[in-house]
Image (cartoon, coloured by chain):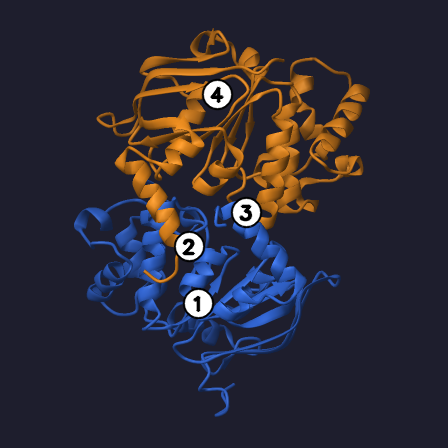
Amino acid sequence: MNALGLEVRGAVTYLQKSPGVPVLRGLDLTVRPGAAHGVVGPSGSGKSTLIRAILGLLRLDAGEITVGDQRVAGLRGASLARMVGLVPQDAAGALDPSKPLWWSLTEGLRIHRMASRARCLEVAASLLCRVGLDEGLMNRLPRELSGGQAQRVCIARALALEVGLILADEPTSALDPYLEAEVMDVLRSAATGATLLLVTHSLSVVATWCDDVTVLSEGQAVETGPVGRVLGAPVHPVTAELVKATKAMWTAEA
Amino acid sequence: MTTSSTTQQSLLIEGLCVTYRGRVEALKDVSLTLYPGQSLAIAGRSGSGKSTLAACILGLLGPRAVVKGRVVVAGIDVNQATKDELRRLRGRVVGYVGQNPYAAFDPLFRLGFQLEEACVADDVAVADALRLAGLEPTRGLLRSYPHELSGGMLQRAQLAAAILNRPSLLVLDEPTGALDPVSRLALARLIQDLRAKMTLVLITHDIGLAARLAEDIAFLHDGRVVACGKTAQVLAHPGVEEVHALLSAWRRTSGVA
């Protein structure tokens, strides 16, 4: 599938338990087809809620989300799943612990009746190769993988349905710097030909691996643009504070 | 088991070897000594044995791990300790802050109740600990359930719980891993201030955090200490190839040239 753009217009959603406070408060976001787009923001700014909304896992109270030229609200789950893939934060927890990897990798293909069992094994092998893993791993169980391997398997799984938009929610925050660099390289190259929306706490990851970035604060997009411009010359105070805190962390003793 | 030669050290680790399931050697002959007031970072890649070392200090290794060597914390030999000694050790002698703020508290009980229950002193101690951890002990906060607090607040609450009973040694296992840059810096500053009050062991792969918080650093690789010394010196002259590789990867992911 070709890379799909993403358009979020005036998204509003309320938490069920505290109806007075919207989590997304008129969020606007445009992601160019084929771009690697980072989403950063303080905890509680609505990053994960945004991901859930794009996946159709929660209903918006106002506004709309469009993937490619289709409105998410009007799509059946099955159709959406063939357009949008997810790379989760907790890779090991996202794989069925009782099933070998080839099974997890091709679960989507079977649900959508796109492949026979024999074909599944072939696909699993080629998916593992695409993320730089040995195809011999496909009969292993998730618990036999290291953290970095598990995250690569999740990337491979997101590629299985050849989606046009890949969402990654903090995909490397549980990894050491060495693996983080490795996995981000794999994710970026695996997502070639698709659009990548990367939610992260790390401005450095955005700076190294993304083209564009949007900063969220209290459920709204407060700043958006090319990574170099936004992080190099932040306009909004929230962006400035994030940049400042990131720099202060590395510069010694203050 | 107390001997006069070990009481001065906050933490003494001698020839520590840990083997899981008879085949995975998680730690190989690790020796470290920490005196009161010192701060030590333990850095290294995933799987290098960092968290196993933390589990050893708290006496938390399960029956499937075979432990050789000695771990002595404030005079208590962890591997020989009785159940009562271990109970006193965890919380009163050693405080522990883990990576995941959401796993630190029971989701079914209010924060205030959980802190009071864990506290050996009175409510004042709870309030003091919360303040030291950068939280105002309001009625609203104490009556909150864990899910009502943000990750940054919960992580500070976890820090409060760890220092509640004034331990002499604080073990922090990736304390800022799950936080956004602003909460992360705030927590780092709080921990920095605690250094005057207790000995610190910081387990992390975040070299920036280690440089900020720890005077000394030990790099683990494949279960062995491959470099050890003053943080500034080790970072400036890594020497060993493993440390060098980790530092370059860290510079890449942290955006520091």
The chain that hosts pointer 1 is B
* Callout 1 touching callout 3 (CB < 8 Å): no
The chain that hosts pointer 4 is A
First reached walking from the N terminus: tag 4 or tag 2: 4
Which chain's colour is blue? B
Q: Residue at x 43, y 40 (%)?
A: A203
Q: CA distance from mark 4 to mark 3?
A: 31 Å
Q: CA distance from mark 4 to mark 2?
A: 35 Å
Q: Quadrant of residue B156?
A: bottom left
Q: Is residue A108 left or right of residue A208?
A: right
Q: Nearer the viewer, residue B163 or A4?
A: A4
Image position of B110 with respect to B26: above or below: above
Q: CA distance from mark 3 to mark 2?
A: 13 Å
Residue A166: x %, y % from top left: 55, 24
**What amino acid is labelled 4 in the image?**
Leu
Q: Which residue is mark 1?
A: B214
The chain that hosts pointer 3 is B
Identify the mark at residue A250; answer none if there is no mark.
Answer: 2
**What amino acid is labelled 3 in the image?**
Arg
Does dot 2 land on a helix, a strand or a loop?
A: helix
Instruction: For marks 4 and 2, give the one nearer the viewer.
Output: 2
Q: Residue at x 28, y 31 (%)?
A: A218
